[in-house]
């Protein structure tokens, strides 16, 4: 028997970190001691299979099992939590197996709120045991109902004709024991809100007090929906699907152009409601029959999406001086827009600030909660239309910048959305001059998504393959070559790729990325300067959207997309827009706050703001012409200290 | 030459009044001196032709002319203002030629209001010269509009989706010079009214400031409509037509029964809107293109008519304990009910008090103005459903009584509506034991209308042809005979009648009349007693409806339909319901007053009120079992003095 205290050198690739490990220690623990975090959701029990590593040299003690076929085992694959040190070894940690705390530093999740301290939905249900009418008391049915509601503190009610038509029968069929659903709609004015009650429907009384609202985020790319149980305050899991309008253009501008065609507006309106209707069908699996008990929808989208779902022509959003028809919306009926909900179900659209800072941003700011905190916060939503909000509980400024589609896979030769087959992670081995790819779904790569583009560009920049101007150095790597559009970098040869074609990154792709990140960065700069502050004053950066979660913060700073701040100041919130809708559904004060946020936000039209163009031009480098804005990470805190 | 001072005896028929008249005096003046008033609208100029009389004996000096053909002249017809006394003569004054001040005493017209002191319609038009948007000022179109309206004091506005959809184009097409029509809808609650503004539509600015409301009275029998110019406060002439629902039953009960059939409610709803639509077409002749500038409709009807036009099932109105679905109504859209007006045109239905005291009564009380006066007033609307209101500015009570259809020509063998051919006036010559008929349109009689029935019954009662119990005395007149339904009185032999049949009044007809008048009278009695007063305390009696104008007050007292009060206490208002709608259109305070009136009225269900049945039984005589209630006219003032 060998000495158990004997230490073996275990070298982890691609990081080239070497750890001295005692015989019998698991590879997982050895990697942890070396500061390399490997996913192990099950806590090292060998049951989740997420800690797969690859034995590249030497040996470990292990055997095939649940997650390892004989064939995989033969190829060198091992579960890090089950493989034990038995001597020196070289072990490769695939990108997919790396934990969040690896050197791919990502933002922590923000303290996103999805619940409220006090449940106060606009929808209220009142169970009424009415005295049946008699000769001594034969007021109208409507007066009887209003009187009983008034006793429960609900005054000033309005009932529409459709409800009025069915109500007398309902009262009698239910023996005058009914449940009345009321929506207390705050009429919002500059100074005050007046509650304005609307009887949504009258149903026979029953024991089931569950009733729902729907939260809906209408994204240009995806539509999300979530049921919110108003009786318990509990939000249910969300469902999502691609916005059917995508067939008519990827971004808001192409949608606006399409809406101008004959029947175009109508078709786009129907596409998005069709998408939503499919989601609503899926929600039936969560709560069968929920529609009957769903009384209101809170929906948010960018300004164009809001107009399209409401069937209001968005054309002026695109024409200078960018005047949207509406920035706040009347109460609508969901069914009136073609949404498959009951005729009485209401729909409230979040207010927007301007043509390019929409209800989704107002809703996201609501969900992030920074509007009520002291710390100076930058809130960004990265996309073709990038939105920026800077402020705190005292003030809010916002702007939109036209980043172009690079972050969403547009204008990039092999650009694609963050879907299976998209290169998302990328690591360049400067010694071997080769790279490792992290592909969504662990499948052969077919393209590169937005966050992948940032990671590839950052690694290649650090490796000297791409220079400050975004040009490739042909001598830096054998993978740089002349392609049909100029120099390109070979990410994946045809033989390894899903489409049977070489997947490459071109200089033009990098140019588009630089334009996109520069548009965003010069946006933050302009707003920060407009209020007399500088970047270092930002105490918190919140990144909204699906992008935020997968974004590598260091890499985004490296290319100049994010300001150079300590990683711990960054937070991401998932779908902030959907979360804000959820909060509004749960609480009228939250809805009123959303309207306050809208009113408080000072909108800057960047293209009209002096200095923006200069800043934009200066940002067209990696990371920036002004290198003092981007000190090396080690000097960052120091630089901020001076700032 | 004969002496000009020679006096001739002129005997006027059927009154048998003899006047001594100098030669050359006009027959008109002679009749006047005898206390007999002959119509002479033109003041005796011989140009109106309304003072036609018939020379029955002797001679007068006259010649044919504009209004008298040779043939008429040959028959003895003369114009009283042109015929001069030339010797003794017997002259018959046809009922049609009798002035209002004849012994056919009618009520004077009430001080019905059709205009308001201060024009304050809920509809307001604001001309806005908006600053076109620029880069420095690119708020949404809706915010721009709201801001400008706010500067004109119009806050808290709501714009619906349809208006929002068309508004951006209108703004630009009109170069941002627009006229915005707003409806300030008072949300009425128990204690206060909150203005709630709704932008009705946005139009290009123009110089034409005319804009209209429509006042509509939805009667069971007829529908009336009137345009009201909101710029000037001027009501235009009304138009009317039979309610198309008549094909489905004459009274509200038969309509309610019909509504229960499959498609019945829908058909009745369409019938009344079709009728209204025909009237709206006729209004085009008054103001071509008025529809585009008509923004609101104020409509009143009885409770059943209100439900039918709103498409709400009225069945519970008919079933004890007589609970209507609604007594006040949400704001509706006229187009939503199938009325041919612009999609944005609003419709407000007057509130009702109970199932049988409807919005038409509330509206009529508003128009009569007695709700703000000190004098104790009885307001009645005589019909199949008779409505009674008693009160003054301090209190109001009301009741409905089921009079049966006698007053509207129903349940009477030759009953008909007050249309050409209906016997309306009737005079019995006790000496000759014959009668004279006044027929609407001066045509051969085909039947007898409600007021005719009252006049016939009163005259025959005074002549002893009909006794206290409503029985005919076969010995009183040769015109009393045995008919197929028992005793009957021959009003017009077949040869003189339009239908080629004898027109008769039967004992059954008189029974029905007694039941009808008794139901009304015991209604007043019950209400008067309920508040601790008696009939003599009534300082004013207002008779509403078309009936009021043609009703002979003395005759109505004679049969016991009206309380025995001096004729000068009686007033009629025409279509009080239509007038009330007109006032509401002109002034929001008037509309709020209508709602106050509704709330102030204490409704009595007569059938449930102790004593009503006894009073009803006691009233089943002519005029009443309690003759002290009906002293002879000469003793009336005295009797009241004792009361």
Image (cartoon, coloured by chain):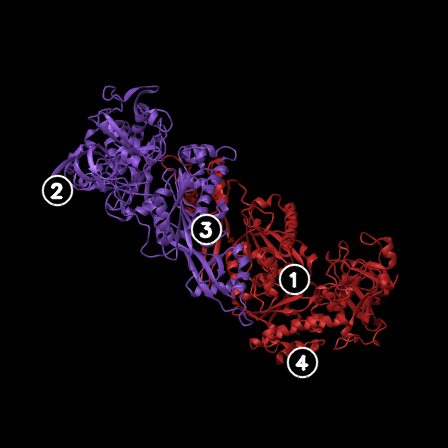
Chain colours: A purple, B red
Tell whether label 1 touches label 4 (CB within 8 Å). Answer: no
Location of residue A199 in the rendering, given as x and y in whole percent from the top left corner: 47, 57
**Subunit of label 1:** B
Residue B628 has which mark? 4
Say which residue label 1 marks. Answer: B257
Measured Cα–Cα span from mark 2 to mark 4 = 130 Å
The percent coordinates of residue B580 (x first, y second) are 58, 59
- Chain ID at mark 2: A
Q: CA distance from mark 4 to mark 1?
A: 42 Å
Q: Is residue B178 above or below residue A489?
A: below
Residue depicted at x 62% and y 43% = B288
Work out which quarter of the rendered image holds the N terminus of chain A and state it: top left
Q: Earlier in the sequence, mark 4 or mark 1?
A: 1
Earlier-in-chain disc, 3 versus 2: 2
For numbered disc 2, what is the local secondary structure? loop
Q: Please name the residue that numbered disc 2 is placed on.
A: A4
Q: Position of residue A487 (x, y in %)?
A: 30, 20
**Front one among B295 and A56:** A56
Does B634 sit left or right of A30 as displayed?
right
Name the residue nearer the viewer: B538 or B195: B195
């Amino acid at each position: 028997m060998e000495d158990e205290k004997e230490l073996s050198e275990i070298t982890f690739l691609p990081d080239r970190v070497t750890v001295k490990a005692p015989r019998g220690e698991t590879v997982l623990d050895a990697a942890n001691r070396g500061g390399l975090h490997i996913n192990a959701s099950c806590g090292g029990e060998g049951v989740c299979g997420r800690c797969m590593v690859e034995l590249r040299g030497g040996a470990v003690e292990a055997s095939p099992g649940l997650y390892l076929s004989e064939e995989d085992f033969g190829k060198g694959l091992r579960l890090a939590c089950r493989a034990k040190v038995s001597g020196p070894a070289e072990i490769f940690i695939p990108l997919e197996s790396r934990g969040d705390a690896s050197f791919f530093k990502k933002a922590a999740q923000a303290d996103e709120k999805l619940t409220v301290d006090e449940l106060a939905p606009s929808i209220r249900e009142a169970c009424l045991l009415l005295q049946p009418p008699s000769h001594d008391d034969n007021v109208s049915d409507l007066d009887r109902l209003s009187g009983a509601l008034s006793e429960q503190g609900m005054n000033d009610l309005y009932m529409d004709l459709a409800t009025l038509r069915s109500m007398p029968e309902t009262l009698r069929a239910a023996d005058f024991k009914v449940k009345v659903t009321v929506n207390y709609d705050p009429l919002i004015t500059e100074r005050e809100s007046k509650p304005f009650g609307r009887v949504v429907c009258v149903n026979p009384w029953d024991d089931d007090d569950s009733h729902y609202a729907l939260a809906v985020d209408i994204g240009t790319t995806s539509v999300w929906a979530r049921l919110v149980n108003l009786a318990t305050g509990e939000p249910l899991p969300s469902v999502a699907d691609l916005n059917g309008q995508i067939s008519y253009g990827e971004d808001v501008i192409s949608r606006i152009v399409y809406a101008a065609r004959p029947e175009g507006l109508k078709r786009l309106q129907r596409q998005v409601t069709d998408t939503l209707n499919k989601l609503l069908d899926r929600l039936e699996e969560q709560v069968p029959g929920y529609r009957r008990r769903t009384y209101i929808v809170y929906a948010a989208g960018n300004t164009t999406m809001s107009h399209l779902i409401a069937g209001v022509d968005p054309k002026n959003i695109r024409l200078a001086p960018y005047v949207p028809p509406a920035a706040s919306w009347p109460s609508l009926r969901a069914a009136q827009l073609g949404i498959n909900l009951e005729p009485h179900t209401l729909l409230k659209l979040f207010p927007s600030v301007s043509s390019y800072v929409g209800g989704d941003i107002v809703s996201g700011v609501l969900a992030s909660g920074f509007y009520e905190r002291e710390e100076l916060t930058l809130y960004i939503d990265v996309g073709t239309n990038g939105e920026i909000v800077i402020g705190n509980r005292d003030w809010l400024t916002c702007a939109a910048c036209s980043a172009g589609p690079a972050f969403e896979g547009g204008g990039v030769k092999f650009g694609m959305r963050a879907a299976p087959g998209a290169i998302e992670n990328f690591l360049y081995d400067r010694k071997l001059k080769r790279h490792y790819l992290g592909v969504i779904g662990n499948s052969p790569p077919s393209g590169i998504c937005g966050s992948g583009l940032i990671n590839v560009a950052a690694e290649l920049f650090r490796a000297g393959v791409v220079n400050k101007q975004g040009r490739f150095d042909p001598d830096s790597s054998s993978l740089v070559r002349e392609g049909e559009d100029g120099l390109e970098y070979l990410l994946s040869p045809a033989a390894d790729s899903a489409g049977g074609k070489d997947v490459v990154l071109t200089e033009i792709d990098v140019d588009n990325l630089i334009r996109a990140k520069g548009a965003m960065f010069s946006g933050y700069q302009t707003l920060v300067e407009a209020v007399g502050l500088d970047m270092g004053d930002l105490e918190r950066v919140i990144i909204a959207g699906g992008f935020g979660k997968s974004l590598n913060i260091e890499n985004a700073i490296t290319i100049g997309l994010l300001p150079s701040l300590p990683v711990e100041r960054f937070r991401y919130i998932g779908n902030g827009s959907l979360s804000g809708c959820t909060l509004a559904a749960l609480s009228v004060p939250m809805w009123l706050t959303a309207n306050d946020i809208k009113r408080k936000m000072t909108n800057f039209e960047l293209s009209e703001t002096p200095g923006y163009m200069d800043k934009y031009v200066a940002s067209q480098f990696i990371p920036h012409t002004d290198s003092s804005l981007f000190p090396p990470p080690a000097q960052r805190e120091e630089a901020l200290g001076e700032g």
